[in-house]
Image: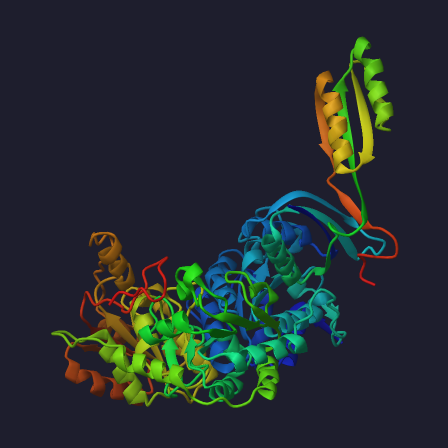
Amino acid sequence: MKVTGAEALIKALQDEGVDTVFGYPGGAVLPIYDALYDSGLNHILTRHEQGAAHAADGYARATGKPGVCIATSGPGATNLVTGIANAYMDSIPLVAFTGQVVTSLLGRDSFQEADITGITMPITKHNYLVEDPKDLTKVVREAFYVATTGRPGPVLVDIPKDISSGETEYHEPSPLCMPGYKPPTSGDIDLVNKAAAAIMASERPVIYAGGGVISAGAHRELKKLAELMVAPVTTTLMGLGAFPEDHPLSLGMLGMHGTRYANYAVCECDLLLAVGVRFDDRVTGKIESFASQAKIIHADIDPAEIGKNVPADISIVGDLKKVLQQLLERLEAKLPGAWLEKVKKWKKEYPLNFEPGQRIKPQQVIKEIYNVTKGEAIVTTEVGQHQMWAAQYYTYTKPRSFITSGGLGTMGYGFPAAIGAQVGCPDEVVFDIAGDGSIQMNIQELATAVNYELPVNVAILNNGYLGMVRQWQELFYNRRYSHSEMINPDFVKLAEAYGAEGYRVEKAADIKPVLEQAVKSSKPVMMDFVVEQEENVVPMVPPGEALNNMLG
Amino acid sequence: MRHTLAVLVENNPGVLARVAGLFSRRGFNIDSLAVGRTDDPAISRMTIVVEGDNRTLEQVTKQLHKLVDVIKITDVTEEPHVERELVMVKVLADRAARLEIMQIADVFRAKIVDFGPKTLTLEATGTEEKINALEEALRPYTIKELMRTGKIAMLRGAKYTTVK
């Protein structure tokens, strides 16, 4: 059967089980958009390519399926870059397709030409420039395989216009042949045995769990393991939801803005079981004093993470679901002891706390969102203070319910990610918790939400500042608030101009009714919570300090 | 310490950029790099000499393995192996110096590959140490131009760095 490259591409996408793509058309992808027109694929037109990349990423995080985005050559492709880097840092399966100038014009600074495979080399797991229409089906198959297996990540496929419009014989892709790509499976038995013995011998164990647990779908195994070990569990920002935070063994988040009890527990544990984590500097603080009394067991699917930042005493490379199962088979139930009592005492003594004030406190809004949604919402965030409060004050009980830009820290991520999550999970309540600064970085996506009747809720914690920048300026730059104060638009009118609902909330008593109204509404809702201007995120480990050295 | 890595890669477009880019962005230093295809035209071999402690080397190896095009990495440093480098040197050679330079070439088993009116060009292969020694020996005669290929290395005996 003769088909165009674009038709082969669409067919290949359907063969991969793709039903939804996020994108933005342009000259070099016209053949692909023509094939999309009557393909039956659900295409969401965002208002900026960055929005498409983040939406595909949010879709992937909410559903566990790979996200797909399409952009044209040149500026379309470069607009994807932040979104791709974001997915790369957080190990999210994303497949990005870009148009490219025709092969005869490649490398000649042609109109809307950008070397996107060159540009994205350091921020993709792998990328391709397709040079023959007959390679398309094979490349698509490989791209999805690489993006979704092993440590997931973004893959980019660059398709010159003459390749997508060129004719080819359609044939089923031949079996994958990638001699250089072998994702790890189960863990080495000797190492698992060693780890099990160390766990059984420990008296003060702590489990430090990250996003790897969620991407491996190993949250059930993690819960069993924690209960069997009687080990308190702390998660990273990316790991929130991997362990139910209403569980008595939960310590919440650790690190720079982690709970006091999580950080104390890590400082005093004699065994740290690190699963699906990468010992990021925001987690470890001063690296020499991180878990300095502990034997460290590090299990991860990526061998390059082992010993990258912190040397491990026992390291297990493998698929975490399998590794945790292997551990479970070798462990016997332990009994609660003095360690658990100590941890409980810390939890009682140092709870997360904030003082009520004249104005609405941002933490209050998060707690109320939790109450109104009964903890069942999918929460996305932008980046900054509101993100940390969203991590601290909403109780996450299931994986894929907290969607945030962890590694790259991308302002403007949360709103398009919420759109992607809502597209992927139409029956869920989705909240983007935002700051007044961040929301303006991709606010054009209001048009997308209205266009596709997506009832996403945006809660802006409006303090009139780039709050986290202001906090650092207060603490480390002698309160010199250099360019961190913002004069903002009227968010209510703005929402209405786009055809969404808008509310301004200035009194604490109005928080709950407005949230209830928003959840009920079938339209996108933007809520402008006017909050205390100079509230700080605490506790806080100053950069470069040990975890037990917290402010606030 | 310096390590010599034999890296087999799929001969795909951009593979050299992927490897070189990885080294630069992760802050690893390449001392030398030699690339060429193997007996299988779909597979190329890179011989990379990298400077760093064991921890750096472990990271280099693990990060290289993450590249989809990288098939196999062998650290041959500690294994018995044969290593060679090729050098070409153009030396200023007036009448008086010519004989001496030709004697040096003889000692190092270098070949004279170009006999110019004012210069001699020598070609030599050998280990890095031998090439260094040749360079030192020729230095008093004004080296006009010198180029080295970077090292290639092969394990001795029945051990292979190939895919099979």
> Considering the image in quadrants, where does the C terminus of chain B appear?
bottom right
Percent position (x, y) of residue B158? 88, 57
Judge left or right: residue A192 versus residue A230: right
Extreme residue in the top direction = B96
Percent position (x, y) of residue B97? 79, 12
- Residue A524 visible, this orientation: yes
Q: Quadrant of residue A462?
A: bottom left
Judge left or right: residue A408 versus residue A300: left
Q: Quadrant of residue B39?
A: bottom right
Q: Nearer the viewer, residue B155 or B19?
A: B155
Percent position (x, y) of residue A186? 65, 78
Establish if A118 lies above or below A499: above
Extreme residue in the left direction = A358
Percent position (x, y) of residue A304? 59, 63
Colour basis:
rainbow
Judge left or right: residue B41 versus residue A280: right
Establish if B54 lies above or below A70: above
Residue visible at 58% across and 80% down in the picture: A196
Q: Quadrant of residue A298?
A: bottom right
Residue visible at 19% across and 72% down in the picture: A531
Q: Nearer the viewer, residue A80 or A296?
A: A296
Judge left or right: residue A247 versus residue A536: right
- Residue A43 visible, this orientation: no
> Considering the image in quadrants, where does the N terminus of chain B appear?
top right
Residue visible at 53% across and 86% down in the picture: A221
